[in-house]
């Protein structure tokens, strides 16, 4: 099965290469009757856009999105929503030297091995430019989730060795978009930005971590066994360019804990949780636990607490230094350090993480609607 | 879409509850003509079986697998292979107290919220017993991969704070199965076992990490964009009960590295790599890189180097202590610490990790066969 | 993608060969909370069972179904329902002569061409025995549809040249099960039975047509474009062994009509139909048309009128005569006329047609639940 | 699952409304390395284009296709091929009267019932304009099939009561495109055209039948059980606007035949067929049968003989007469006969039938590549 689609009921299929005519996607499965806010979608794209600050790539792309179908009189119609984003700045000649040479830790060699024939201009389809389509689709998913009171926020929690020690609940996430790095701690943001500038000046790149937080996701969503909510979130995040790891709740740190420390005890309050035979959406008040090492997900299904997770990103492979490599004939070549690139992916990856989370959460929101006969309308 | 299937071309669908009549699965998409080694499959199940050592649950299950279809005269026929594993030790009464009470950090509450009606006996389908079906299917996938010279090995690399510092290439993985904890370092294995026994004696549980290694996977496998090889591996691992995190190659540590340190330089040796227009399987010799921070995967596609990854598992939620909780009516209850369980999941999870990896790798092996017209037979 | 699954949200995967240990299936996606009526399911299987009358095959199979999972305390749990039907009468030696010879108009040659290795006993998986699993799953789908007041009935409308001229609305379908051929017109039933007996006596076989009727299917179900309700019904019917054609509504006869004759005019009665912004289930009274050449489906979506369709079945390929053929080495051979078989498939295919219709209708019933935001619960 | 995708390995997802900005599709799964012939694709679109002759709709659309991705230096790259066809002639005001009125036998009412909100301009997405995207994708599939020597041809075999009695093998199909109706019998073509003109003059419409023929499809393709080759062809054809029936091989006529008449005997010639353990592509010479009532498919798998089938199309619902109907409030209204439309769909549906057949055949060609381990490269 081709790998350019994601999701089962809220389903996105993307297309496009870095230096082709356009990139875009089709969203199939967005329910009819959703208020379509194009301005919001464009704003989400603007958050991912190149050239938005001094610490990101200076490629010139307005990333202006066009909507070709699926919307009528301001509302979705239930038919496929097609998004088109023309490529504007296609300095393809920059990449002629890559027609045969394989850049280290890029996808050049692996694509050549797979397909035998590839669009090498700017990495072709392996370029992170593809993620703009995801952001557009994710923005539509966010609009759907908002109708249910579900909010997603991501932020940069680590750049290189600079790690924000406080967890999400100790931070004011409304500050995230106030700085170029998208870290809600202003002092740490400042440090991170300075560090990235220094790394860039040295012609180098650096990795980072993004933390994602979901609030208001009702209990009972997610599928047991293979399509556990966190498994789908994990796949979504790992499908983003440069991602190397994913953890949710207690994550890798949790392995050091005892069960008696790690178990999240239920809390009875405000009349308690009453769930027998009821649809998730009728649970009042939402259940709660004293701690939340589970990260809002138990047995692959949401429990109504905040969902939180972390995604690791490696340093960008394009560096401004010459590197020894090989070409398709197996001969040694020198890959020159040139082309426009990000010194660190995380500031621009924040909206991508949110978009991918939104796609997963919207999909499972829809999937849940067929799970329980008692919740069907009479 | 229901969530009990995994894979696209090599596809498994599992069924069964912890205390129902049986568990099992259908494998659809195994090619015809594969030598079917039932003994091997049973041996893989034996590695996951309860009661195999002093540090795992003492539930009595022989986990004897039956093959109902898809095999004729010792070979697969291309039709669905159905595996059936009867449940033998169904002490359901042990679980009567759980009919309404929600155990902390179990899936009791979330299943109730989702379905309104659940088989609470032993956790029903949320029990890790379901993974026996995956191991049977994964063993079949391993048989397919072996025909291509692909080998998968997993081992325990951490239990609680006890972490094996050497990486897989510095260890003799053939020693893994020599001890009850499945750690290839005998001295560390001894420490881990002692620690688990101590934890169990205290009625408690502990988490751990499993490292997986794949050797011989040819370059060019995996799909770009959403179904990246590592994204599918990540989802596979995160779908295993108690999994909290996944990383591959440099993982979370890689975020601290500079691009110039992290990039894996190609090495020209033995005539070098020649790939233009060739099928992966004809690449001689396989390409190689000086370092392997990429973990054998670049841009979501294998590069021929070893693939390695780590999976974090939380401490088991069932502990031998009383815990305060609530029931489905929102009333406070005490959940007693009883029932049979594992003090630490990792020793039994090793074959599960391998099985899930095998399913992903077999699937992408098949998926690749339709990618490149030049590799089609004349 | 392997081809042993059907449906997207109500999804069935079958397994098993004619002379293997068992056949069966997994139903994934049946909502939780459905009353599980095993007696009903067994009765449906009895309608398909061999040996039920003088005009069907005399193979001895009780087709007793076992339920291995997915049901607890008389209700579905939302987890996979696994059905198992052991094979009892496996006279495999009857088929040794078919190990290499290809029976004319059977699937022997094509399976050999596809897989190179096949279970030839009784046709292996190409045997219509596989459809027993469909009937079990279809019976579960019927139980779901019944909760919504949806009923499916099929009957034999043609055997050879003997064609029932009256359409379904002119017949008393409650008489269908009163005779061995399952034709609601007793006089015609008698003729058909006599004809089949005569054909069988001559060692021959004959084709037939089954008509299916669905009542109570609410308007608005089915997906436009590729998964039109009638397109999915057509595929379902054509996937039944020996099916050669499908038509719905006016079908092939409709091509001779003028648009002005064929158009189904809407009828305003009892207050008329009010649909703006409403969920299908709230439409009171259901809409109606003066004629129903549309067959209850317009633009691939149900309109609330009766759905009806016809399925053509060829004569069974197994005949009691010697036939010249070839073997796998290309040498001429004589295929002897032996083995147990049906002289005409249609009486036993009636429950299969109903089962496949039920699977499609249940699937689209669930699929519709995510189409329209206005129908979502607040 | 949303219904705007078709195929599993060669997979198309379409978007667009009749009077929106554009229609188009993404083809995911076209193998890399295929020579991309844009002229051929455009010519296929020209065959479906409105305004091409006096007997089709006079809407002005050049249907000029743009390729946005997936092609580089004249070859496919294995990444999604996105086709875009801008809508040029959008006389939306023509349709204002349809904002609330439901046209008889159109999809107006059913879409309203399903979605509550719809783009009524020109039928929105229920318009046959959507099929232009299918023709573009189908043309790409044809290019793939041509590399394997597989050819598809469709023609009009019936208009109203005017039926071509000779079957495809008695006709010179190269004459099909010589006349406006696309009937390979020039005399019958003339009659059909005269008849359609007469019907149109009367403000009416008429149905028809298209016959499709596939030559050179190798034996062994198609999946048994649910995804039988003819079942997928049937679904494909029934998903085309106005289709009412599908039959292949002997079809509905075959039900009147005896098994001894209907069975296709194998013919041994030129050394005969040798298939044991061999890949389909190595079969020399291709197998053959004396008759071909099977229509080239046995047990859902191709047998190497010609595949042929017939598709019934109803008369177009738009007629140039006033019709009584109802509106969304249940009030009686008169629907005026206006708008541009086809008096008979079949001439323009010929390339659509071919395109849908090509999509099915390309998909099963790819699917077969993972069926049989013995055919895998060493």
Image (cartoon, coloured by chain):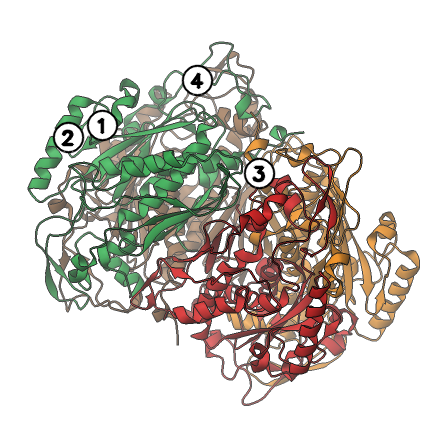
Chain colours: A brown, B green, C red, D orange
Q: Please report the residue visible at 26 percent of the width from the left and 51 percent of the height from the top.
A: B88
At a point 27% along the width and 45% down the height, the residue shown is B241
Indicate which disc residue B192 carries: 2
Measure the C-alpha gap from mark 4 to mark 2: 35 Å
Name the N-terminal-most of marks 4 and 1: 1
Q: Chain of mark 2?
A: B
Question: Circle 1 is placed at which residue position?
Answer: B183
Q: Is residue C10 left or right of residue A184?
A: right
Q: Which residue is mark 4?
A: B288
* Cβ atoms at labels 2 and 1 below 8 Å apart: yes
Q: Picture coordinates of residue A132 (x, y %)?
A: 46, 43
Give the image location of residue A72, x and y in percent: 54, 64
Tell me, yes or no, if residue C365 can be seen here.
no
CB of mark 2 within 8 Å of CB of mark 3?
Answer: no
Q: Residue at x 14, y 45 (%)?
A: A259
Pair 4/1: label in front: 1
Q: Report how far apart the C-alphas of labels 4 and 1 lie in the structure.
A: 28 Å
For the residues beneath circles 4 and 1, the answer to whether they share a chain is: yes
For the residues beneath circles 2 and 3, the answer to whether they share a chain is no
């Amino acid at each position: 099965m081709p790998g350019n689609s994601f999701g089962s009921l809220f389903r996105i299929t993307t297309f496009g290469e870095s230096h082709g005519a356009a990139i875009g996607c089709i969203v199939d499965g967005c329910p009819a009757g959703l208020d379509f806010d194009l301005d919001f979608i464009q704003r989400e794209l603007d958050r991912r856009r190149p050239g938005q600050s001094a610490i990101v790539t200076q490629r010139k792309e307005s990333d202006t999105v066009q909507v070709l179908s699926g919307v009528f009189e301001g509302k979705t119609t239930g038919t496929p929503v097609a998004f088109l984003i023309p490529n504007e700045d296609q300095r393809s000649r920059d990449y002629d030297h890559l027609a045969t040479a394989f850049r280290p830790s890029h996808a050049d060699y692996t694509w050549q091995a797979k397909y035998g024939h590839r669009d090498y201009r700017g990495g072709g389809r392996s370029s992170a430019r593809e993620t703009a389509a995801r952001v557009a689709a994710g923005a539509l998913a966010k609009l759907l989730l908002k109708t249910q009171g579900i909010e997603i926020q991501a932020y940069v929690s680590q750049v290189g060795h600079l790690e924000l020690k406080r967890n999400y609940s100790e931070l004011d996430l409304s500050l995230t978009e106030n700085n170029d790095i998208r870290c809600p701690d202003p002092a740490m943001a400042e440090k991170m930005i300075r560090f990235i500038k220094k790394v860039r000046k040295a012609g180098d790149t650096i990795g980072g971590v993004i933390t994602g937080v979901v609030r208001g996701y009702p209990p009972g969503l997610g599928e047991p066994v293979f399509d556990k909510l966190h498994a789908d979130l994990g796949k979504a995040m790992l499908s983003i360019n440069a991602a190397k790891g994913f953890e949710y709740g207690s994550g890798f740190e949790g392995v050091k804990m005892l069960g008696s420390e790690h178990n999240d005890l239920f809390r009875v309050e405000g009349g308690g949780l009453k769930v027998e035979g009821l649809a998730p959406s009728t649970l009042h008040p939402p259940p709660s636990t004293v701690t939340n090492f589970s990260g809002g997900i138990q047995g692959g299904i949401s429990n109504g607490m905040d969902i939180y997770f972390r995604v690791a990103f490696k340093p960008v492979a394009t560096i401004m230094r010459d590197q020894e490599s090989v070409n398709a004939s197996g001969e040694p070549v020198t890959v020159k350090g040139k082309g426009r690139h990000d010194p660190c992916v995380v500031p621009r990856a924040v909206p991508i993480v949110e978009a991918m989370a939104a796609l997963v959460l919207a999909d499972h929101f829809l999937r849940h609607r067929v799970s329980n006969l008692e919740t069907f309308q009479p």
